[in-house]
Amino acid sequence: MSEDIKKGLLGIVVDETTVSQVMPDINSLTYRGYAVQDLCEKCSFEEVAYLILNKELPNKSQFRKFKKDLEKNRNITINLREIVKHMPKKAHPMDVARTVVSVMGLEDKETNNNSPSSNMRKAIRIFAKTPTAIAAFFRARKGKNVIPPKKGLGFSENFFYMCFGKVPSKEIIKAFDVSLILYAEHSFNVSTFTARTITSSLSDIHSAITGAIGSLKGPLHGGANEEVMHMMNKIKKPENALKWINKALDNKDVVMGFGHRVYKKGDSRVPTMEKYFKKVSKINKDKKFHKIYDLVKNVMIERKNIHPNVDYPTGPTYHLMGFDTDFFTPIFVLSRITGWSAHIMEQHAANKLIRPLSKYSGEQHRKVMLLNQR
């Protein structure tokens, strides 16, 4: 293979962005210049969503209006609710997430309007409605009544309410908010690049986000948080952890939730998410997953010098909150809609069709013979 081919576009800078940056000198991911660790401690998820979409943190009046806009756009149509209720009970929730955003595109009167103001309005609608549709499937597949959104609740509170019929403690809500903040944006990751590629053809925001969800579904991207939980369930108890992980490494098996294309010295989001995972573990009086977490992490660092990425603590955190494992990545979607939308609008603002070249390595020029001559 020629040296000029960069598989996976590794190391290739294809565009510029003002949305986020990984800053090695401070070992931090930043959104619009703010370190995510600071945002997690000092802001709600809605404040960070506003920042990502609007480039600045909101003042009090801007935040009130933003929350009001989200609240009034949370309800989904009767049509979409019925579609969700009749989806196969065994469907993967990521397929449901992909489909509901596509249906929203069919229903939205501004789907084909790519003006900045229209795209912002659509981004708000997708951001507000997708949790309602996902929560509807969470309940419908269990044979439970769908719970509509409730006024006066914040983003995370409302999602818990629509899934479980009640709002958990402030500590749980804060931990969930932190996970959403950490998942909200991450530069030109594969799903964001997918969204920008679709956008570059001047397609619409619903199509771009639908494509991004399809990309995020993969276990090498968003689906890793589910795989982490599957791994922990295979280990079953702390006493099995060392034997399991050492055998996996001896067999050269892929251990999900570790390593990252961007971070070489450890994902900067992990310490924050790990802190809140352990808080949730303490609230739930959990010792099992907490211990498995530490044992597997330590072996991976000692034997391979590979550090966990943010999916590793997020998986067991969502499990302890009561969410089904296959809903972990759809929760990621609810957060990343903000980052995708910001990138889609940024792409539209200075668009050029994304169309890389490929090097042909197939058969050389051949002549076609008639059937009776072959």
Image: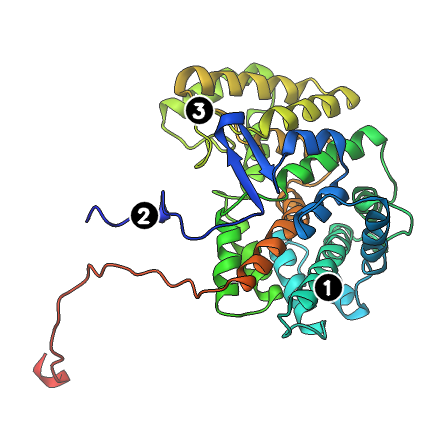
The local crowd at label 2, few if under 14, some if 14 to 19, many if 20 or more residues have their Cα within 10 Å, is: few
Pick whichever, 1 or 344, lies toward us.
344
Q: Earlier in the sequence, mark 2 or mark 3?
A: 2
| SS class, disc 1 | helix
| SS class, disc 2 | helix
Quadrant occupied by the C terminus: bottom left
Frontmost of labels 1 and 2 is 1
Q: Which residue is mark 3?
A: 306
**Residue 136, percent from left and from top:** 77, 55
**Residue 291, percent from left and from top:** 62, 17
Frontmost of labels 1 and 3 is 1
Residue 22 seen from this side: yes
| SS class, disc 3 | loop
Q: Which residue is mark 2?
A: 7
**Which residue: 76% across, 43% down?**
47
Query: Callout 2, which amino acid?
Result: Lys
Query: Callout 1, which amino acid?
Result: Arg
The local crowd at label 3, few if under 14, some if 14 to 19, many if 20 or more residues have their Cα within 10 Å, is: some
**Residue 223, percent from left and from top:** 55, 43
Query: Do residues under tags 1 and 2 come within 8 Å of each other at their CB atoms?
Result: no
Q: Earlier in the sequence, mark 1 or mark 3?
A: 1
